[in-house]
Amino acid sequence: MGCALELPPLALYIHYPWCVKKCPYCDFNSHEGNQQSGYITALLKDLDEDLDYVQGRSIQSIFLGGGTPSLMNEQALFELFSGLKTRLKFADDIEITLETNPGTFEIEKFKAFKRIGINRLSIGVQSFNDQHLKSLGRIHNADEAIYACEKAKQVGFEHFNIDIMYGLENQTLDDYLSDINQAVNLNPEHISFYQLTIEPNTYFAKFPPTLPNDNDIFKMGNRGVNLLEKNGYIRYEVSAFGKTPSRHNLNYWQFGDYIGIGAGAHGKITCSNEPYSFRTTKARSPKDYLKNRQNQVKSIENLSFDFMLNALRLKHGFDLALFTLRTGQSIQAIECQLNKAQALGLLELNDRRIQPSEKGFDFLNDLQAIFL
């Protein structure tokens, strides 16, 4: 039997859908071009329509993603954050992250980002190899990538993330280790380290690049994990390594709540008076979004599966009590699945905690499917 759900922490995701150039591997809701007039006003109206979802909570973290939100000028960001602060209560230790690319135009705005209150950058480096950057369709070079990370520290960003990809076209193990070592030498607080995958409806899906063989990609992944952990980066999620974890990332994987505003943005909200959670989706096309945000609300039919889909991505799993707090269900609701996963060697259980085994983390899709 279900029970009333305790409200989890609340975050805010803001989507900026424009970028200078669409990368051939990107399946995000991003569009080449410039910000359309009225977008900041639309974002704040969007938030006004979602304010009931706050339910008295403070905002613990904000993430501005895209697209390339760092393309916004200082005035637009100032207008946006002024509007946010009049509508929401920010936690005293709020984490505010802005995605940025290492192009010179954006780097020159780092001081402005800091003045506005952004306290964490996520820098889309992907590689420190000019040849690989070109094949990925990136508009920066290796020197600009290094400069962007050094500039972030110089301006005073104590917290920043570097994105690094592996399994790239014609990438050798030496190429890849050079990328990892360069990222570590720049000493970011956080590194997102993930394999290039070919997603449907992308340029790479139509014109696939020649990638390393599966065995070499596997070696890259293992060597990368070992190297990052050896240098003090704790793997707390499948592709996230941090000296300090990102609070916004953790909120997703611990099945917290988040309001999503902007073209194509998603949200997840818990109701406090009944065991009920739902997801929200905004109009995907920027043109449609500016005309009518069309907030679609859909209840989460299988809370236990949704919870496990997210929480099993955490390297060290979760406390048993968190399952009940987030789903309103007793852990006995998934007892059969837990026993099956344990019998297959994919899961480790004790009286207080559930976490993927080493095998389960390597075969995460198989583990998650057990709870469907």
Image (tube, helix red, strand yellow):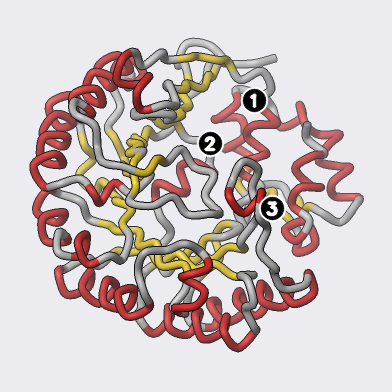
Which of the pair 315/136 is nearer the observer?
136
**Between discs 2 and 1, the one toward the N terminus:** 2
- C-alpha separation, residue under disc 2 versus residue under disc 1: 10 Å
Which of the pair 305/275 is nearer the observer?
305
Residue drawn at x 57%, y 80% is 176
| Quadrant in the picture for residue 243 | bottom left
Percent across and percent down for residue 240 are 52, 60
Mark 2: few/some/many CA within 10 Å (<14, 14-19, 20+): many
Residue drawn at x 38%, y 52% is 21
Query: Which dot marks residue 355?
Result: 3
**Between discs 3 and 2, the one toward the N terminus:** 2
Percent across and percent down for residue 79 are 11, 34
Question: Is 141 situated left or right of 180 in this image?
Answer: left
Q: Is residue 92 above or below residue 304?
A: below
Query: Which dot marks residue 303?
Result: 1
Q: Is residue 117 above or below residue 38?
A: below
